[in-house]
Amino acid sequence: METEFEKQQALFWQQVGEHGCMVLSTSLHDEVTSRMMSFLLLEGELWFQTDRRFQKYRQLRENPRVSLCRDNMTIQGLCREVGRPSDNPAFCEKYRQFFSRSYRLYTGLEEERLFAITPVKAQKWMYDEDGQPYVETLDFRQRVYEKEAYPCQKSSCPSF
């Protein structure tokens, strides 16, 4: 039988989609940087490519903790270098399908590297039918789903 975590995890990945653009935040020595990135969802991980001459590459090599954000969703995770994108047929096939221009311009470059993010925690900010805010949290390590109301005064809560 499917657990609540498994049900909500499947729904979350469905909402993320098998590809898209998200803001990737990385940090090193108390300096945080963020940028839009193209991602693929492959086997429960978020995959992307980048040039090893970039600042984010240096940050990722020394600090694998990252955060992603899109719309009302955030994902915290651990990032690892996988190799060269052109050496990974599954990545290349989907990247070419969804990001054909970037694939043509960058995937075969000598300096390009492939990364995979293993999610640790994800959150979605939502509103119920009465306009009350709540937060849904997926803890991927503990395999726990939580839904928590966010208290606000009725007069200051948004109405939909």
Image (cartoon, rainbow, N blue to C red):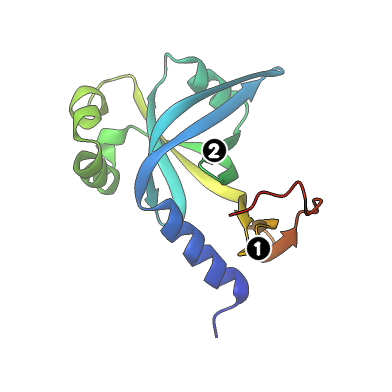
Q: Find numbered disc 1 in the image and state the secondary structure of the residue it sits on.
A: loop
Q: Earlier in the sequence, mark 2 or mark 1?
A: 2
Disc 1 crowd rating (10 Å Cα; few below 14, some 14-19, many 20+) is: few
Query: Which of the labelled discs sits on residue 68, or is there none?
Result: 2
Task: Report the residue marked by disc 1.
Answer: 130
Hey, what amino acid is under mark 1?
A: Asp
Q: Which quarter of the rendered picture does the C terminus lie within?
A: bottom right
**Which residue occupies 56% across, 49% down?**
119
Marks 2 and 1 sit apart, C-alpha to C-alpha, by 29 Å
Q: Which quarter of the rendered picture does the N terminus lie within?
A: bottom right
- What is the x, y in percent for residue 152? 80, 51
Hey, what amino acid is under mark 2?
A: Leu
- What is the x, y in percent for residue 113? 37, 28
**Which residue occupies 25% across, 34% down?**
86
Query: Which residue in the rendered view is the most extreme toward the front?
Result: 155
- What is the x, y in percent for residue 4? 61, 74
